[in-house]
Image (cartoon, grey):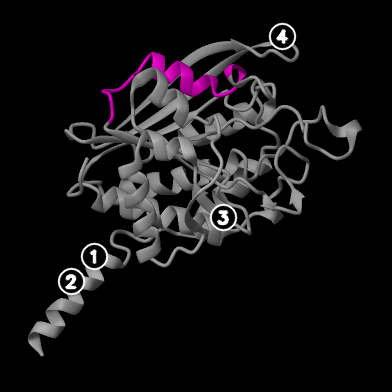
Amino acid sequence: MKKVLILAMILNVSCGPSGPDFDEDHAFEYLLKQCEFGPRNPSSEGYYKCLDFMLEELDKTADEIIIQEFSYQEKKHRTRHDLSNVIARYNIDSEIQTIISCHWDTRPWSDSEPNRKDRNQPIIGANDGGSGVAVLLELAKIMGKNPPPIGVNLVFFDGEDMGIPGEVETFCQGSRFFAKNLPIPKPKEAINLDMVADKQLHLPVEKYSLEYHPDLVRYLWKRADEMGLDAFDITPQNAIYDDHVPLYQYAGIPAIDLIDFKYPNSYANFWHTMDDLPENCSAESLGQVGRLMVDYIYNREGQYW
């Protein structure tokens, strides 16, 4: 009987979630707070309010905060914007450093909006922008109370969504600048979160991720399966130019992307439209991603790097 009990305990540790609790409802409050500021496209009122809010929240917990400033002239209207990547660092003295990232800006144009007259309106970006920030801010709160065993850099990229469709060089300006001008010691790996609050969340394997860091892909999707996180699908689907690509291309950081390609599903589209709103997002979806990130932070140390 004793051997059976010990085996059960081992199986529980290896398969179930291990680490602090991720409060999905509180994370969703972070999403709502961002949306209360309105669109957060660069140089807008909502943008500056959101930046101040993020810095205020991160200042409560981070060992170090770096604001990486740069400027970029977007191509559509040829307007120059002053932009800011925000890096919140935890356990900065650890030999093992990783990145968990997102973008915090929202798209200045609803260019996928069915109603043509609204296509120049900025989006609220509850999912596209707001969701990744919500998860990272909740992780920051957790690490403030539970110091991580590895060095974790929460990176909020700016200028991700000012691009012209079909011209990849116009997207992901913050991650490009970051990768070309690393403000921190080069991390071992990186995980980027994008579009992770969809009520119908579906997270297949993004194909560049499988190319850049197959070991991490296999590790995370296996853990998701063991933890019963049913949004994760090990099937490889599309390849997308997201913030993980510049990290790998310009800084040589093995990086992956957790992204939902179909928001909300194959029969409708809220991406880059006026319908990217909180009512089309869910706390439970944030919770699935957040719990996996907590497990990664507190259990990755002993794994293969």
Please give the residue where the numbered disc 2 appears in the rendered image: 10
Residue in front for this viewpoint, 288 or 104: 288
The mark that comes first in sequence, 4 or 2, is 2
Give the residues drawn in magenta, as a range.
169-187
Please give the residue where the numbered disc 1 appears in the rendered image: 14
Residue in front for this viewpoint, 235 or 47: 235
Residue at the image point whose x is 58% and y is 56% from the top: 201
Circle 3: element type: loop
Please give the residue where the numbered disc 4 appears in the rendered image: 78
How far apart marks 2 and 1 lie (CA) works out to 6 Å
Q: Is residue 297 above or below residue 21?
A: above
Relative placement, left or right, of 117 versus 271 is right
Nearer the observer: mark 4 or 3; the answer is: 3
Quarter of the image with the N terminus in it: bottom left
Relative placement, left or right, of 208 versus 83 is left
Nearer the observer: mark 3 or 2; the answer is: 3
Q: Position of residue 264 (x, y in %)?
A: 68, 53
Nearer the observer: mark 4 or 2; the answer is: 2
